Amino acid sequence: MRIIVWIIRLAVFLVLFGFAVKNDQFITLNFYMGKQWQLPLVFVILVAFAAGALVGVTATLSSLVRQRREIGRLRKALRKAEAEVKSTVGTAVVPRPDGDAPEAF
């Protein structure tokens, strides 16, 4: 299994490396106030991909924090319920046949 994973990694690396070699032309990025940068196309694509990944991670971070907080709250409630059950085990309540208040054993 490990060999298959390494073969896939090598294939992805070779495809991306070939893409980088084929797109080595310089492009001009035009900014405000007449500013310009000359950069290789593959670098611009890499920066755009990294920025998109960062935005995606940031977007999922809030839901992850909310879920972890809820999990902590539920674990605390579970421990409290388990402690309550342990304290009440052994105190069975049986009704009396004459209809009076139940007795605890």
Image: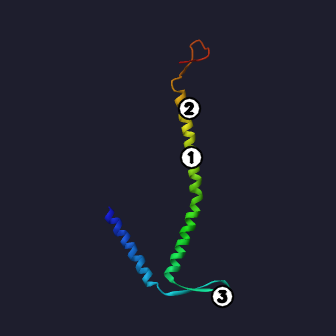
Element type at mark 1: helix
Which mark, residue 84? 2
Is residue 104 placed above or below 82 in the rendered structure? Answer: above
95 vs 32, nearest the viewer: 32
Q: Quadrant of residue 7?
A: bottom left
Crowding near pointer 3: few (<14 within 10 Å), some, many (20+)?
Answer: few
Residue 45's tag is none
- Give the mark nearest the N terminus, 3 or 1: 3
Q: Tell me the kind of residue under disc 1.
A: Gly
Residue in the picture at 58% in, 48% down: 70
Residue located 36% across and 69% down the image: 8
Q: Which residue is mark 3?
A: 34
Q: Are marks 2 and 1 in contact (CB under 8 Å)?
A: no
Q: Earlier in the sequence, mark 2 or mark 1?
A: 1
Which residue was labeled with disc 1? 72
Along the polypeptide, which appears first: circle 2 or circle 3?
3
Q: Residues within 10 Å of mark 1 (few under 14, many from 20)?
A: few
- Which residue occupies the extreme top position in the image? 98
x then y, percent, for residue 49: 52, 73
- What residue occupies the far right of the structure in this picture? 33
Residue 97: x %, y % from top left? 56, 13
Name the residue located 61 percent from the left edge and 86 percent from the top edge: 36
